[in-house]
Image (spheres, rainbow, N blue to C red):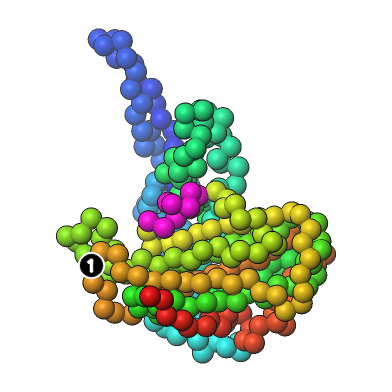
């Protein structure tokens, strides 16, 4: 989330012949214009320019509130009874991250920092700066004809798993065009403060193996995405691939204990978006909608793992 641009001042030291960068905390631009106590032009209101993580936190809270309203509205749709109150926290957590991507930010890092010695692990280094990237809420709120977003949620215990089947739109078959699948898994875990891993529950999924999508992950390093409580994966492809109507992408969500014994159910949410470029005239959303038994919600198959 944006925190506003920040000016720094260079202060020279004549004694040491060095320069030090200091934060410019002025109320003037740049930054984000926010409400502020005071009186301006006779009105009991004022604004100032501010920047920092507090701004980003406020924007994240506002986005979560808007997504909450969307989830409430989805309760009125077929299958909406699955969106129970206990799953709202993980659904909101997953949805906020789901719209995030690096965009072109990593290209600048590559130009400045990438070398032959760090190239193999460069994506992991960049992820420490960028995380999952800039959040774009507009990619989550509305579906379009070219973009369909599906939600799944449930609970898992140690050694259990659930398999989700995402139907493929027939209009994509044998089409040579850009397409992207974004998958975001979020969960809440009890912690073990005396264990170095901290989280008692580790959840994860393997990206679906299908020729429709490249097996090469995009952006964040695949090791890094499994270290927290959100796994965010982006897969793309452009080559033409033929498939039959009724084919699906399978995503299995797994759970196991990570930092000591896990003896409780872990709530989780899975968000999946399949899309093509906006200018491509393909009814992706409508075709997927027609092929799922319950609108919007993906129905899982429960399995046990050893």
| Nearer to us in this view, 120 or 42 | 120
The spot of residue 106 in percent (x, y) is 55, 40
For label 1, the SS is loop
Q: Is residue 76 left or right of residue 291?
A: left
The spot of residue 17 in percent (x, y) is 31, 10
Q: In this view, does 186 lie to the left or right of 280?
A: left
Q: In this view, does 108 lie to the left or right of 257?
A: right
Query: Above or below — where is 99 with respect to 50?
Result: below
Q: Is residue 267 left or right of residue 237?
A: left
Local crowd at mark 1 within 10 Å, few (<14), some, or many (≥20)? some
Any part of residue 276 in sight: yes
Residue segment shown in magenta: 220-227
| Nearer to us in this view, 28 or 262 | 262
Outermost residue on the left side: it is 194
The spot of residue 73 in percent (x, y) is 56, 82
In the image, what residue occupies the spot 62% across and 66% down?
A: 273
Residue 222 within the magenta-colored segment of the rendering = yes
In the image, what residue occupies the spot 48% across and 49% down?
A: 221
In the image, what residue occupies the spot 53% across and 81% down?
A: 300
Please state, as top left, top right, bottom left or bottom right, where the C terminus lies in the image.
Answer: bottom left
Query: Above or below — where is 109 with respect to 161?
Result: above
Outermost residue on the front side: it is 306
Any part of residue 137 in sight: no
| Nearer to us in this view, 55 or 254 | 254
| Nearer to us in this view, 236 or 37 | 236
Chief secondary structure of the magenta span?
loop
The spot of residue 146 in percent (x, y) is 74, 66
Q: In which quarter of the image is residue 79?
A: bottom right
Pointer 1: what residue? 260
In the image, what residue occupies the spot 58% across and 80% down?
A: 298
Residue 77 within the magenta-colored segment of the rendering = no
């Amino acid at each position: 989330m944006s925190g506003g641009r920040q000016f720094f001042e260079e202060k020279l030291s004549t004694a040491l012949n060095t320069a030090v960068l200091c934060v410019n905390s002025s109320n003037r631009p740049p930054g984000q214009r926010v409400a502020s106590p005071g009186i301006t032009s006779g009105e009991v209101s004022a604004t100032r320019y501010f920047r920092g993580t507090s701004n980003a936190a406020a924007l994240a809270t506002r986005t979560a509130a808007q997504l909450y309203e969307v989830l409430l509205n989805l309760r009125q749709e077929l299958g909406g009874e699955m969106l129970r109150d206990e799953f709202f926290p993980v659904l909101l957590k997953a949805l906020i991250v789901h719209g995030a991507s690096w965009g072109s930010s990593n290209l600048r890092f590559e130009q400045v920092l990438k070398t032959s010695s760090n190239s193999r692990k460069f994506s992991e280094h960049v992820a420490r700066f960028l995380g999952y990237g800039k959040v774009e809420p507009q990619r989550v709120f509305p579906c379009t004809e070219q973009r369909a977003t599906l939600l799944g949620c449930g609970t898992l215990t140690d050694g259990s798993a659930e398999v989700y089947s995402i139907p493929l739109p027939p209009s994509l078959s044998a089409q040579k065009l850009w397409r992207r699948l974004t998958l975001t898994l979020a969960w809440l875990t009890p912690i073990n403060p005396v264990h170095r891993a901290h989280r008692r529950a580790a959840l994860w999924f393997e990206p679906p193996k299908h020729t429709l999508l490249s097996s090469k992950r995009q952006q964040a390093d695949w090791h890094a995405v499994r270290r927290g409580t959100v796994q965010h994966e982006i897969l793309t492809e452009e080559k033409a691939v033929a498939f039959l109507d009724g084919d699906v992408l399978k995503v299995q969500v797994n759970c196991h204990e990570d930092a000591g014994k896990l003896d409780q159910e872990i709530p989780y949410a899975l968000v999946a978006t399949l899309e093509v470029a906006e200018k491509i005239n393909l009814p992706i959303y409508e075709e997927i909608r027609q092929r799922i038994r319950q609108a919007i919600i993906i129905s899982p198959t429960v399995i046990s793992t050893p």
